[in-house]
Image (cartoon, grey):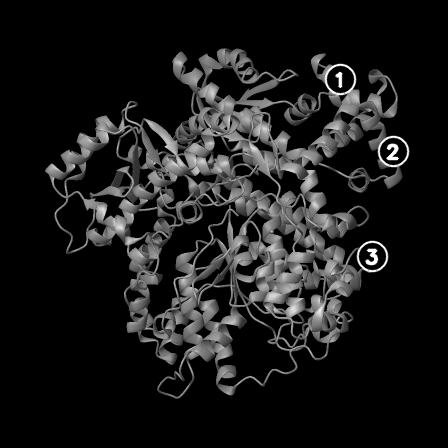
Amino acid sequence: MPTLLLVDGSSYLYRAFHALPDLRNSQGEPTGAIRGVLSMLRRLESDYKAEFRACVFDAKGKTFRDDWYPEYKSHRPPMPDDLRAQIVPLHEAVQAEGWPLLAVEGVEADDVIGTLTRQALERGWEVVISTGDKDLTQLVRPGVQWVNTMSEEVLDSAGVEAKFGVPPERIVDYLALVGDTVDNVPGVEKCGPKTAVKWLTEYGTLDNLVANADKVGGKVGENLRRHLDFLPLGKKLVTVATDVELPVTLDELPARADDKVALRALYERFEFRGWLKDLDAGAASVAASKAATEARRFDGQGSRGQAPGDVAFDPSRLAPLPRSSHPQGFSVGAAPAASLFGDGEGEEQLAAGAAPTGGVAGAHRSGYVTILDWPGFDAWLAKISAAALTAFDTETTCLNPMAAQLVGMSFAVEPGEAAYLPLAHRASDAPAQLPLNEVLDKLRPWLESDQHAKLGQNLKYDAHVLANHGIALRGIAHDTLLESYVLESDKPHDMDSLAKRHLGLATIPYTEVCGKGAKQIGFDEVAIDRATEYAAEDADVTLRLHRHLHPQLQGTAALDALYRDIEMPVLGVLQRMERTGVLIDPFLLSQHSEELGRRLHDLEREAHDLAGQPFNLGSPKQLGEILFGKLGLPVVKKTATGQPSTDEEVLEKLAEDYPLPKLLLEHRSLAKLKSTYADKLPRMVNPKTGRVHTSFSQATAVTGRLSSSEPNLQNIPIRTPEGRRIRAAFIAPREHLIVSADYSQIELRIMAHLSDDARLLEAFAQGEDVHRATAGEVFGVAPAEVTSEQRRYAKVINFGLIYGMSAHGLAKNLGIERAAAQSWIDRYFARYPGVAAYMDRTRAEAREQGYVETVFGRRLYLPDIRASQAGRRAGAERAAINAPMQGTAADLIKKAMIATDAWLAASGLKSRLVLQVHDELVLEVPKPELDTIRAELPKLMGGVAELKVPLLVEVGAGDNWDEAH
């Protein structure tokens, strides 16, 4: 999934200005703030792979908070002249570096960041917020990290709570109590952080504290009661708005290439000599360095991390923004100002990385060895050949699993003892290494042996790396990534986080080995002794983690079976599917892109005609002026600034009665389709295979569903002709067909199984149209007399209720009165009492346990199920009802993949699995095998589990995915 990197430029501007000495060029112009901010942006760019990004500054003038509270920020001194002089050139430099820059009149940078964060999370993106402002920690939640580049502190939800004593959702309450001296927001007199944390721990929320203010004793209690009248305004002032009108959309914030001409002029003017040298070194070397940075940041998807995008995002589990499996960072201390902000020697110090301040206790590293000769190799080959289980890891050249090449391998069979086998280090002072091909020939019998058990962290990636060298990795026995995922799906699963959480170990960060910034080196350039410390630690810590995690799995029979019988077997299936890839027709996509472009142009012209003037369709401000100012459309809701909102929900409501909002929604949908699929997919074809190779992640969604990335093939729309044309570009090879096998109404069938409702079970057992049957029950007519409109209503009811839809939601969805919707819901539960009982029972069990379970024992944790805030608690209750169905469906499709893969291999058929999307399997099938696949696949998929209702599988075939589906 994409990552959005948001930088609080105003925060860093002031901090850089005050942190550095009075730096000037030879003309006397101040340069420190410019140098400092640009240095931090460069570090962020190297540390975080972000497809979209923005650097946000405060705009001149007052904001809506000044209207609420005239004293807001009134005590701040005037901006120093030397700082003011650097703002314009800094803005120019930021944009020249390829960063979209935002400064929105009337709102603060925090509110712009809050709004973009909400918009990104609604799309399922990850967000990294880089700032030194503690106020923005209120935005942290699964999917959002808070990063302080100056101190190298990284906080997820747990980190925020550890730092402040309250979770992110209580930061606003905390700030309202302690006040914000920077912004001149007074808090309760004498109420410091400890008192605020104590009160919020005891009373839960600020509202509850206020309700019990008379019970708070002592002088500080008196102060609290005197401050009660101001607290609502104080809380309002410190709450980051997430619904302000922005002049851009997320799609307009892609990371851009830098403008070297503009940068050269700026670097020359301000005499940034080190950066000028980088420009002079040539674009090719800079690009290579950046590629190495990105390739190694996730340790090649190997031991250090899960694949990019392996972050759960489940909106139902989150409180509304005022949303990780993100690894919680740890501070390695603030570097000297020269290394943070300088060029020349300072930049070299930064690129080389700070001296290690963390890492596993050095005592066990004495057991790490480097294999540089054949006797050493033979000794370790004998050791791993005799071992019952060997922790194994690869070090590689890049992140792409289809392109990565070996740099080295590490092994461990006992904690504290590990070996690194360097194979392709190319530093000038590197000692002679054993020849790669000869080593692989000698290791091949062990690597390809099912009898020699291997353990790793995300071994799917290592299997790809070895396949790139012609070796089929076998004997994959355990994977700590999946052990962690099964045990605690809502936590981070990368090795560094696991080591810290379970072993209390701080592992060596990659940046300590390879440095940072534009001068970061690839792992093949690392000195071998240092590489040994890092790589051997991977194998050692993986072994330690397995010995800690696996007994916990074995302690619960259902979790052990889930790991052993579903997650581990599907790992190999996914690796083979990724390796196979899928064939696309780039010419069809190109044609579709041109047609979409023409349609977008026509829609823009039609929008201008409807508006009576030209305007930017992507500008909320201009759009608001047109819709509500010129056309006088009704205001549906307002933003925090009091302006009429133009978000998607508003446009959908207005589109019911007005043509322009409807047209705008169509334009947005088609623009996304064009950029995300029609334009992008042809560029992702692997030149060696001629196919597109997506990456499937097992350890992403808390429900157990697989996710797809680079490219994401899970979200291609299929309900519009334009979306179906994207699917039509996924084609079968010559003399083959695409076959789609899809579980029919799987979640409703799981609901029938879980609820044990007699009428619902009967409907599925008799093969009835369940939506027609429901319509008959709800509307009191015979199934044969049900109208198409009644069936449509019943379908919305059926699916809506299993997602926890309320009467309000049903009324809105169907365009009816709330009372009528409630009446239909009441009739539904009266006709299906087992469903009502299941929902009540599930909510109660969730509150008692803190989690719910799938049919196969997967645990789906609900941290907000006991939340005091009603909205969060209601969201968790809705998730509690739906999660067992989503999770069971995920388990079933994984079991179907395992069974299908095994059957195809055993039968000698040449058909191949190529994709898995939601409840659907997609295969490439030679035409002579079609009848066999059609006949056997439904029986195979329908027989993977014994439920109280039959599992129905629908199979289609065609020359492309759209025809087959």
Residue at image point 59% right, 28% down: 888
Q: Residue 685 at x, y = what percent?
A: 41, 39
| Left or right of residue 695: residue 235 | right
Instruction: Measure the alpha-carbon separation of dots 1 and 2.
Output: 22 Å
Mark 3 residue crowding within 10 angstroms, few (<14) / some (14–19) / many (20+): few
Say what amino acid the circle numbered 1 marks: Ala
Instruction: Measure the alpha-carbon separation of dots 2 and 3.
Output: 30 Å
Q: Residue 849 at x, y = what percent?
A: 63, 37
Q: Nearer the viewer, mark 2 or mark 3?
A: 2
Point out which mark residue 823 bears: 2
Point out which mark residue 758 bears: 1
Reply above or below: 198 against 964: below
**Relative to the observer, which residue lies in front, 522 or 138?**
138
Say what amino acid the circle numbered 3 marks: Pro
Point out which mark residue 129 bears: none
Reply above or below: 380 against 938: below
Q: In this figure, which residue is indicated by the disc labeled 3? A: 634
The numbered mark, 2 or 3, whose residue comes first in the sequence reads 3
- For label 3, the SS is loop
Mark 1 residue crowding within 10 angstroms, few (<14) / some (14–19) / many (20+): some
Q: Quadrant of residue 35?
A: bottom left
On the question of residue 616 being in view, the answer is no
Q: Nearer the viewer, mark 3 or mark 1?
A: 1
Task: Classify the position of the C terminus by image quarter.
Answer: top right
| Left or right of residue 876: residue 433 | left
Say what amino acid the circle numbered 2 marks: Ser
